[in-house]
Image (spheres, rainbow, N blue to C red):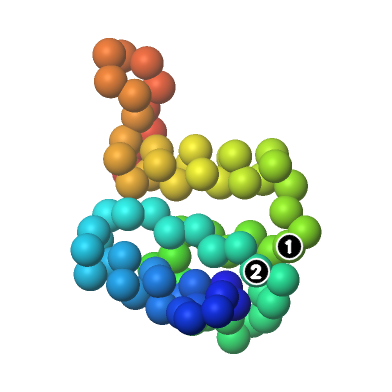
C-alpha cells in the first residue's frame, strides 16, 4: 500500500482506467477499517494483511483470476459469476 511515489489505492485507480476487469489485490501492514473501505470502494478484489502467507496469496490470486476471467478453457474448471 505504501510505496515511494504512489499508494496502492492510487495504482488501483490508475489500473481501472486501463482495464476495468483487472483484479487488484492489495498487500499491507496497515489493514485498518478505513483503508479496507477505501480499497473496496476502489473495487479492489481483496486486501491481504502482512505478514502474508504464500498459501493465502496463491488462493487469493487464483480466486481473483477465476472471478475476473472465468474458468479454464477445454471443459476443465469454471466458476460461475
Nearest the viewer among 14 and 31 is 14
Secondary structure under the numbered disc 2 in the rendered image: strand
Is residue 65 shown left or right of residue 50? left
Q: How many marks?
A: 2
Residue 67 versus residue 28 in the image, above or below: above
Instruction: Specify few, some or many for label 2: CA neighbours under 10 Å numbering under 14, 14-19, or 20 or more.
Output: some
Is residue 12 shown left or right of residue 37? left
Q: Residue at x 50, y 58 (%)?
A: 25
Residue 18 versus residue 81 in the image, above or below: below
Q: Which mark is residue 50?
A: 1
Residue 36 versus residue 15 in the image, above or below: below
Nearest the viewer among 73 and 2 is 2
Whole-percent x, y for residue 6 in the image: 46, 79
Whole-percent x, y for residue 7 in the image: 50, 78
Q: Residue at x 34, y 24 (%)?
A: 72
Whole-percent x, y for residue 53 in the image: 74, 47
Q: Residue at x 35, y 29 (%)?
A: 71
Is residue 75 shown left or right of residue 4? left
Q: Earlier in the sequence, mark 2 or mark 1?
A: 2
Is residue 32 shown left or right of residue 39? right
Query: What is the quadrant of residue 1 in the picture?
Result: bottom right
Residue 74 versus residue 10 in the image, above or below: above
> In this view, which residue lies farthest toward the front?
4
Q: Separation of disc 2 and disc 1 at Cα? A: 6 Å
> In this view, which residue lies farthest toward the bottom?
34
Secondary structure under the numbered disc 1 in the rendered image: loop
Q: Which mark is residue 28?
A: 2
Q: Residue at x 39, y 69 (%)?
A: 12
Amino acid at each position: 500500500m505504501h510505496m515511494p511515489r504512489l499508494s496502492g489505492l492510487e495504482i488501483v485507480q490508475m489500473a481501472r482506467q486501463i482495464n476495468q476487469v483487472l483484479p487488484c489485490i492489495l498487500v499491507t501492514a496497515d489493514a485498518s477499517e478505513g483503508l479496507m473501505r477505501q480499497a473496496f470502494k476502489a473495487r479492489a478484489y481483496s486486501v491481504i494483511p502482512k505478514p502474508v502467507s504464500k498459501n493465502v496469496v496463491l488462493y487469493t490470486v487464483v480466486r481473483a483470476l477465476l472471478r475476473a476471467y472465468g474458468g479454464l478453457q477445454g471443459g476443465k474448471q469454471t466458476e460461475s459469476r
